[in-house]
Amino acid sequence: MPDSHDTTNLFDARGAANPLDILKRVYGFSAFRGQQQSVVEHVVAGGDAVVLFPTGAGKSLCFQIPALCRKGVGIVVSPLIALMRDQVEALKQVGVRAAALNSSLTREEAVAIRRALSRGELDLLYVTPERAVTDGFAEMAADIDIALFAIDEAHCVSQWGHDFRPEYRGLDCLASRFPGVPRIALTATADPHTRDDIIERLALNGARVFTSSFDRPNIAYEIVERDQPRQQLLRFLSRFKDASGIVYCLSRAKVEETADWLNAQGIRALPYHAGMDRALRDAHQDAFLKEENLCLVATVAFGMGIDKPDVRYVAHLDLPGSVEAYYQETGRAGRDGLPSEVWMAYGMADVIQRRRMIDEGGSPEEIKRIERAKLNALLAICETAGCRRQAILAHFGEAHPGRCGHCDTCLKPVETWDGTEAAIKALAAVYRTGERFGTGHVVDVLIGTVNEKTERFGHVNMPVFGAGKELPARTWQSVFRQLLALGLISVDHAAFGALKLEPEARVVFRRERQLFFRKDRPASGKAARGQKSAGARQRSELAGSDLELFERLRSERLSIARDLDVPPYVVFPDTTLIALAKQRPRDFDDLLEIPGVGESKRERYGEAFLAVIDAFEDGG
Ligand code: ADP
Ligand code: ZN
C-alpha cells in the first residue's frame, strides 16, 4: 500500500494539470457532468460560487478539483466531525493529500497536520464552522496559501431550513479576513428562501449562482395510506435484498420499538436518535456506512452529511416536517445514481399530530402560520392524484411534464371521484354536531352507528344521522383527511381533536366549489406487486455471468474494506463494480477505462480486482 508521500507524485505536473486531466487521472471519470465544468472553471479563475445541485449530482468535485488546480490548500467547512474521517479517507484513496482538523484528534495528530499545512503539503483541509471563525484559525491561515474556501451543507446558515446551525452565521467573516480567496457554498436544498439566506448570510452577493434540475430520476416515489404500518413496512422492505436503507420515525421511542421489531422479523436493524449514548450512536452510524445490508431506523437527527452512495431505500413511517424535509430525507437514497425507492405511509393521525405539534409548540403565531402552510403543501403531495415527482418539483418552482412513470400514481393511476356531495354531508355533520367532536364520532354519525355516545348526545335523532350510510367508514375517514389537507376543516387540539369548519367550507356548502377526491386503494398493499425490487433492478443491468462476477467483485471489495476499516464504497462504488463485471478488463491499461478507477486506485486495488476477473474468466 503506498503511503502518503507517494501521493505527491500524482501532482508533480500540477502546474500543467487542467481540470479534465485531474478528473481523469485522479477520479477516473472521463467527462464532467452537467454544470460541473462551468463551476470548476469559474472557481479556478478565482470567482465565488453558490452551487445548488441535488444530492448525487456531484458537488464534491466542484470544489475538490479547483482546490487541486489552484495554488495552496482548499479549506472545506463541513458540519459533522463524525463524517470527516470518511471523506478524508476517500480523498486519500484517490491520492489527494487531505486531512481534517477537529477536536477528535490527539495532540500529536493535530501538530502533524499543522506542520503539513505550513509546508504546503496538503491539498484539502476539513474544518468545522466553529473552528473556521476563530482567531487561531485566522492566524494559522495567514501564513499559508489558500486555494479556496468551500462551505458544504451551506443551507445550515438559514433559519428557514431544517438544519439550522448558528455556527454557520459567523462564516461571513471569511469574506473580510481572506479577501481574494474564492469561496464556494454548496447545498442540495432548493427553495428560494434558503438560497437567498445563503447569499446574504455568507456575504456571497457577487457570487455566480449555479442551479440544476432538482429531479432525482433514479428515485421511485411511493406514498401509501397507513393501514397496518408494520406489515406495510415489512412488505416494502421485502423488495430489497442485500441492500441498506433508512427508516425514519418521528419519536425516539418509535425508533427503538421499530428497530426491535424489525430484528425480530429477521431484518438487521439498528436504532439512531439524539437521545442515545453518543458512542453507541456513532457506532450505529459507522455500522450503517460499513455494512452492506443494514436497515437504520432513525429520527431526523440522522442523515445530514451522510455520503453513503448506495442507500437503496428510504421509508417514512411518519409524516416528515415539510416538503423540503421530505425531499432532503428521501434524497439520501441513490446518491450513486442507481435505482432506489422511497416510500411513506401516512394517515389521519399524522395530520392531527403534526397540527398539534405546531399549535402547541412555542413558536410565535407568525412562525406557526408558516409551519401550517408547509404542512399543507406536504399534504397536497400526499393526496395528489397526479404525478408525485411533478408535485414535488412544482413545490420548488420547477416545471415537470408529469407522467414520470416512476412514482406510484404514474405506475398505477389513482381514480378520483366527484366528492362534492359527500363533502357537503361531512361538513354538515361537523357543523350540526356543534364542532365539538373528533373524526371517529362524526363518522359514526354519518354512517348511523347507534352507540352510547351517539345516543347520549342525541345525535341519533338528527337528520344527518345515517345521511352517509351509502359509503363505508373507511371512505369517510379518507374524506375527512382530504378535507383537512384542503384546509376546509381544522382540528382543535384544545378541544381534544374536535373538527372545526374553516371559512372556505362555506364555498363548498354553497356548491361554488367542486371537489375531487382520491379513491383510496384497497388496503392490501397490492400496489407494490409487480414492481421489481431495487436490488433486482440494479442487477438486471447485469445478467447471468456478469451478475455472478459482480458478486465476487463485491466480496473482494468487502474484504479489502474490512482490512482498511473503511466503508466498501470508499474502495469502489457499485457503479465501478458493475462496469468491471461488464467490461472485464484484463490489464492495467484496460482498468483506466473503468469509471471510478483513477491512477491511485489502480495502484492500490488494480491487481486484486484483475485477479478476481482472471480467475473468473478462467472458469475459477
Ligand atoms: P453530491 O455531493 O452532489 O451529493 P457527490 O459529490 O457525492 O454528490 O457525487 C455523487 C456521485 O457521483 C459520487 O459517487 C461521485 O463519484 C459521482 N460523480 C461525480 N461527478 C462525476 C462525473 N463527472 N462522472 C462520473 N461520476 C461522477
Ligand atoms: Zn410520476
Image (cartoon, rainbow, N blue to C red):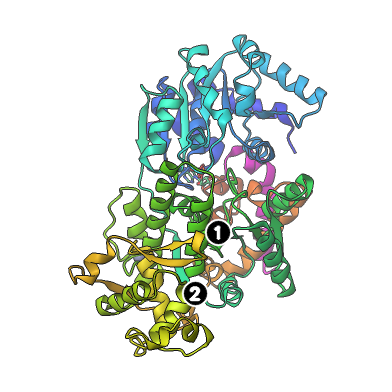
Compared to residue 177, the image places residue 598 above or below, namely below
Residue 613 among magenta residues: yes
Q: Residues within 10 Å of mark 2 (few under 14, many from 20)?
A: few
Of 69 and 368, nearer the camera is 368
Q: Is residue 25 visible?
A: yes
Left or right of 497, for residue 418: left
Amino acid type of the residue tagged 1 in the rendering: Ile
**Residues in magenta, as a range:** 597-620
**In the depicted structure, whether residue 245 falls above or below residue 239:** above
Residue 182 appears left or right of 462: right
Q: Nearer the viewer, residue 435 or 277?
A: 435
Q: Is residue 346 visible?
A: no
Residue in the image at 49% along x and 34% along y: 154
Q: Give the numbered dot on residue 578.
A: 1
Please report the residue visible at 54 percent of the width from the left and 63 percent of the height from the top: 318
Which of the marked residues, 1 or 2, is nearer the chain's N terminus? Answer: 2
- Residue 348: image location, x then y, percent: 47, 69
* Majority secondary structure of magenta residues: helix
